[in-house]
Image (cartoon, grey):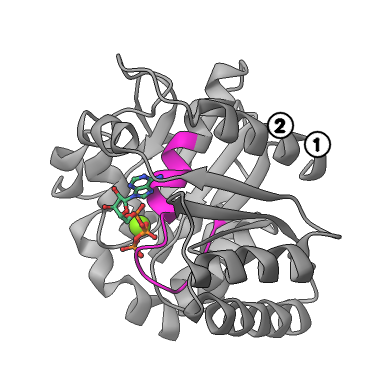
Amino acid sequence: MPRTLTLANQKGGVAKTTDTINLAGALNEMGEDVLIVDLDPQGNLTDGVGLDAAYTEEPPSLYDAMVDPEGHDLASLAYSHEEFDVVPANIDMFNLASELTTAMRGHEALRRLLADIEGYDTVLVDSPPSLGILTDNALLGTENVVLPVLAEDTSIRALKLLSNQIDTLEQEFDVTIPERAVVVSRLEYPLDGEEKEMLGWFEDTYGDVLPVVEIRKRVAIKRAYNDGVSIFAHDEDCDQEAAFLELADVLREVAE
Ligand SMILES: Nc1ncnc2c1ncn2[C@@H]1O[C@H](COP(=O)(O)OP(=O)(O)OP(=O)(O)O)[C@@H](O)[C@H]1O
Ligand SMILES: [Mg+2]
């Protein structure tokens, strides 16, 4: 069984997608076979790894598989990328949340699809910026969550709301969904007062129980994304490779 992890935060633009791609790149660098599932109907990750054509491809797509998990095989929807495989999002997925809301076991569609996945060391799920049934599917399907956050004071509220939602799912579905790491993303040094205060808050709140990994703001990260690869496969050096390797390393330790 592969290790399965969701990068989740309902707050938009906190680097969920960018961190997913670069974490996958780091795991690949360590010799792992990685599958990414793009569960965000916006399809940013799909576009960001050069699969924009797949986003508008005819059925069957991830949409069809989520609506009818028994009738589909997730692995057959995967595209190969030079670093990892990707199950792309599809434009049909804008209707997916409402379909799942009325479906039998609509919260467990991804879990059922992932139950049959083999041949990968790690599966990463990129989730949408909302606390709805798609993020619920990602959390229940992977039973491990990584928290990308920005060093902004609104992150406190976002993390509390996400944590409440995880508690609710744990109770309702009788599972545990441990938080595995906090990834403080897009940090720009020198830090301003708010950023310093927030880094302190992340350390105080999570430091004793979770790894807190810092990812700096780098234009090289954006350029790699624009070229459809992680920083590891990009033809430009980026000093954040070490940070993503550290994240990959701690996740390999804790999230078996
Ligand atoms: N370390 C970084 N350095 C520079 N830019 C970054 C970094 N991480 C993310 N970004 C940029 O920040 C923006 C938001 O990142 P991203 O799309 O990954 O966030 P997201 O949480 O997935 O957003 P959404 O909530 O819309 O899904 C993007 O423009 C991305 O290129
Ligand atoms: Mg995203």
Q: Quadrant of residue 98?
A: bottom left
From this view, report whether residue 72 is shown above or below residue 164. Answer: above
* Residue 65 magenta-highlighted: no
Queried whether the magenta region covers residue 20, the answer comes back as yes
- Residue that badge 2 annotates: 249
Residue at 19%, 59% (x, y): give it. 91
Q: Quadrant of residue 196?
A: bottom right
Q: Secondary structure at mark 2?
A: helix
Between residues 69 and 232, which one lies in front from this camera angle? 232
Seen from this angle, which residue lies furthest right?
208
Disc 2 residue: CB within 8 Å of ligand 1: no
C-alpha gap between disc 2 and disc 1: 6 Å
Secondary structure beneath label 1: helix
Left or right of residue 223: residue 243: right
- Amino acid type at circle 1 is Glu
The residue depicted at 81 percent of the width and 44 percent of the height is 254
Of residue 162 and residue 158, the one placed in the foreground of this image is 158
Q: Is residue 233 above or below residue 131?
A: above
Q: Any mark on residue 127, and which?
A: none
Q: Residue at x 80, y 76 (%)?
A: 174
Amino acid at dot 2 = Asp
Quadrant where the C terminus is found in the figure:
top right
Residue 246 point in image, percent of width and height:
66, 33
Marks 1 and 2: in contact by CB < 8 Å?
yes
Residue behind mark 1 = 253
Q: Label 2 crowding class (10 Å Cα cut-off): few <14, some 14-19, many 20+?
A: some
Q: Taking 54 as reference, is 110 left or right?
A: right
Q: Quadrant of the N terminus?
A: top right
Stretch in magenta = 7-22
Q: Quadrant of residue 250?
A: top right
